[in-house]
Image: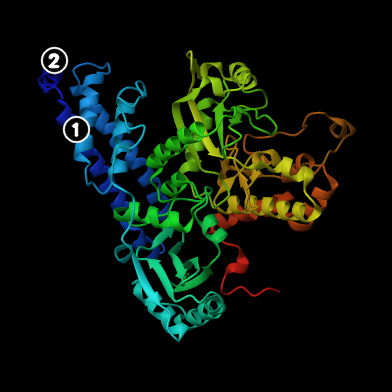
Amino acid sequence: MSRLTHAIKQPPLTPSSLAVNILKGFEKSYRQFCAITQDSKARFENRDWAGVQLATKERLQSYERMINMLSSKLYSQLETPQISTELWQQTKDYYSRLLIGHPQAKQAETFFNSTFSRLFRRQGISPQHIYIQSQSDTQISYQNEDLCQDFTIGGIVSTTIERLLNFYKFNNAWRDFGGDVTAIRMQLTPLIKKHCFRHIELIKHVFYRNKGAYLIGRLKGKKHQLPIVFAILNDDNGQLYVDAVLTQRDDLSILFGFARAYFMVDGRATSQIIAYLQELMPSKPNYELWSALGLVKHSKTEFYRQHLEQLAHSDDYFEVAEGIKGMVMTVFTLPSSDIVFKIIKDEFAPPKQVTHAIVKEKYQLVKEHDRVGRMADTQEFSNFHFPRHRMSQALIEELQKVAPSQLVFSDDEVIIKHLYTERRMIPLNIFLRSANPTQVDNAIDEYGNAIKQLAAANIFPGDMLFKNFGVTRHGRVIFYDYDEIWYMQQCKFRELPQPQTYEQMIASEPWYSVGKYDVFPEEFAHFMLGQPRVKRSFMKLHPELLSAQYWRQLQDNFKRGIYPDVYPYRKHKQLSYKPL
């Protein structure tokens, strides 16, 4: 009775109080985001790699916790659980006035959208109630002198490099400062002379991710400029060294790729950093940059706005995506875009034994895990609206056949209750069909490296068929089917038992017991290596993947705390690399 009395005494929310409450919730949430991010320097210096993984999860989860707490509080104060368009129009107008001059205005608009969506279970999604398009007149830009530090290249390049490295104050000693300076000078001097570069300009804030710290900026001359990245690592003795200097545009694009974990960099400067990175990578989608810095909710907002723009400037039809149909997901795309949409089917054919809840858990695991550049990032949406006239009849029939529970039809829209979006790639099995021998070798080498690097991140892909991997425009092979992934520690890698009788030899089903997490690596060859040229390439490059002993050795390394390092650049990019 006292609870009911207490609830009745709560004053009804006015547009102004509702707007103020939401903005306070955003600012508290953003302070938490910045605090977690700010500690990344200490985690790097202390080699607290477990702490890095925990911080990544905490930063993603803190936003959801704040939305849950705030929406629960506001719901108890709303006079009616139904949407009042008048109330929310006035609230949105008042909120927009509060955001004038706000440094995180666009992210705050996204927080408003999240709060409204949580309160009303994503009903009433319209410009009357939320920010479908941004109303902030705050331009995302930067002041060069505030964001960046300029290092003029004088007559002695080594002096410039010394000043540059000393500008960033780490609490660790350098392992071989002079050696690093010399190696960097030898790499950069030909480039500086060729393009007459006169400045190295770097963002003042260090980018942290996994075990690396990255200094990011550009080489500048009168006529040319190139991106530049200094990758700094912390060795087993707590000493720093520069592992690589990257100066190619593709290197930077891969560093910020959609299959990487999120960077941690000073959250107070996020908008300015985004503006700077867009100059360095003009072809990279805006939403991917927001995501790369850990602003995944605002990344979804930017993605949706880009999606609407794509629809407005195209006239093609959504259609079923190229490739072998999946047993768990149905996938479709708009040919003029580089995105696929993935929907969980209502029912899964044998031998699949997962549930909808398990599939969602797997996708969330990937979201929070270190993807080591080998698992595509996804964005999860509820009640995603598509113009009905832009969906091919074949696609509508396919969706009605495999996922009718996820569909809502109106006269002019198809609403899909739950889906994931992901960057489109060429399925590896399709790529291999028309690949020449060199391309086959490169793709199979990438495929094997992808599996090994996933294992290094404690992930076993489960279903390793080529159809579950894609090839990017950079030629990298990326895994994108997550319903059967397991942690490496869960797996029991076994040799295939040898048949002892004639009946065992001719048995159509395994005559030996098989546990839920049992894996027989020898069987991979049967499913993957049907094409002779693919088999030759695989056996030349990655035959150990067919050995149970190889996988058990990886597990043993994990138990002893030995984790292979995986960095976002190829080995030949390392300063210390010496080809055989």
| Amino acid type of the residue that numbered disc 2 sits on in the rendered structure | Met
Q: SS for tag 2?
A: loop
- Relative depth, front residue between 396 and 536: 396
Left or right of 208 on screen, residue 451: right
| Amino acid type of the residue that numbered disc 1 sits on in the rendered structure | Tyr
Quarter where residue 160 is shown = bottom left
Q: Residue at x 45, y 86 (%)?
A: 156
Residue 94 got which mark?
Answer: 1
Which coloring applies here? rainbow
Rendered location of residue 229, percent (x, y): 48, 66
- Residue for badge 2: 1
- Relative depth, front residue between 195 and 165: 195
Q: Residue furthest right?
A: 502
Q: Residue furthest front?
A: 223
Left or right of 442 on screen, residue 83: left
Q: Earlier in the sequence, mark 2 or mark 1?
A: 2
